[in-house]
Image: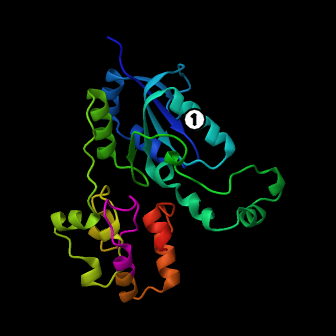
């Protein structure tokens, strides 16, 4: 019996989400017995040509070469799954979307005339059809294993979409916004981290992007009540998921 063929692709990103797959350790050994890892340059130089049953894509589209390559990946992939904030929302590099790219190039590079890049950093779904998105910066190991397990048996992944606040309630965490007036994006951020920062008495930074249903206007009002001005709100919303519409538009 032929095993499903898996490919893992990198575009503009830091590789952190691919490393989450390698960090699965014991589970990765079991996965390797059940799938043919046909292309994964982070793990091995050996690869075979497509088509692939499943392609996992990390990173955003920031160059014309990226845009052309993702279309080729889509053409040889049965299912295409994007992982991480870069692939699903443009990543932290999407901060350039609100400015003149020429200003950045001249400030960063000694010879900007040799740099070829697009004006914007965009998610994979802006360019090709995507079958499933896995959020996070980086993604969560448990969600990744659920995703891969579901794809192997042909069912839809069971990935929660509720806000971080529910995780805090389940963990018995006091609300940092209520208890200490700490600015926190937990009410508008999708679950995935297990409420890591609020569990350590810090506000949520929105690593997993907007939750399924959010009221950003009310969220901004709450942040103002806790002492944030326009600059502070802008900085809080413009991090890992600045390209996500719910965060970017409101900021």
Q: Quadrant of residue 72?
A: top right
Question: Magenta residues: mostly which secondary structure?
Answer: loop
Q: Nearer the viewer, residue 241 or 37?
A: 241
Task: Identify the image quadrant of the N terminus.
Answer: top left
Vertical relation: 31 (above or below) 191 = above
Q: Residue at x 33, y 21 (%)?
A: 33
User: Is residue 65 at least partly visible in the picture?
Assistant: yes
Q: Nearer the viewer, residue 11 or 247?
A: 247
Picture coordinates of residue 35 (x, y %)? 36, 23
Position of 77 compared to 27: left or right? right
Q: Residue at x 25, y 33 (%)?
A: 155
Q: What is the secondary structure assignment of the residue under circle 1?
A: helix
Residue at the farthest top position: 1
Q: Which residues are magenta?
A: 203-220
User: Is residue 26 at least partly visible in the picture?
Assistant: no
Q: Residue at x 32, y 57 (%)?
A: 193
Picture coordinates of residue 20 (x, y %)? 40, 44
Q: Quadrant of residue 82?
A: top left
Mark 1 surroundings: few (<14), some (14-19) or many (≥20) residues within 10 A = some
Looking at the rendered structure, the number of numbered marks drawn on it comes to: 1
Mark 1 lies on residue: 71
Picture coordinates of residue 92 (x, y %)? 54, 60
Q: Residue at x 37, y 21 (%)?
A: 4
The image's colouring method is rainbow
Q: Nearer the viewer, residue 169 or 88?
A: 88
Taking the magenta stretch, the answer to whether it contains residue 248 is: no
Vertical relation: 83 (above or below) 26 = below
Vertical relation: 165 (above or below) 230 = above
Vertical relation: 198 (above or below) 212 = below
């Amino acid at each position: 019996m032929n095993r499903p063929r898996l490919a893992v692709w990198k575009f503009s990103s830091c590789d952190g989400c691919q490393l989450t797959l390698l960090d699965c350790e014991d589970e990765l050994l079991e996965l390797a017995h059940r799938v043919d890892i046909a292309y994964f340059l982070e793990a091995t130089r050996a690869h075979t040509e497509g088509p692939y049953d499943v392609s996992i894509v990390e990173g955003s589209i920031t160059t014309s070469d990226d845009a052309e390559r993702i279309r080729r990946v889509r053409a040889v992939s049965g299912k295409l799954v994007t992982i991480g904030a870069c692939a699903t929302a443009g990543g932290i590099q999407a901060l350039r979307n609100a400015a003149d790219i020429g200003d950045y190039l001249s400030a960063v590079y000694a010879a900007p005339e040799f740099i070829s890049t697009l004006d914007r950093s965009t998610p994979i779904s802006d360019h090709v059809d995507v079958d499933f998105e896995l959020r996070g910066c980086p993604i969560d190991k448990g969600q990744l294993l659920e995703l891969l397990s579901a794809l192997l048996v042909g069912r839809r992944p069971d990935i929660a979409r509720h806000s971080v606040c529910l995780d805090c309630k389940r963990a018995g965490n006091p609300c940092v916004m209520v208890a200490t007036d700490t600015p926190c994006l937990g009410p508008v951020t999708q679950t995935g981290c297990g409420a890591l920062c609020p569990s350590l008495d810090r506000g949520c930074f929105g690593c997993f992007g907007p939750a399924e249903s959010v009221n950003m206007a009310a969220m901004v009002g709450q942040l103002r009540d806790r002492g944030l001005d326009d600059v502070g709100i802008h900085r809080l919303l413009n991090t890992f998921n600045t390209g996500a519409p719910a965060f970017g538009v409101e900021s």
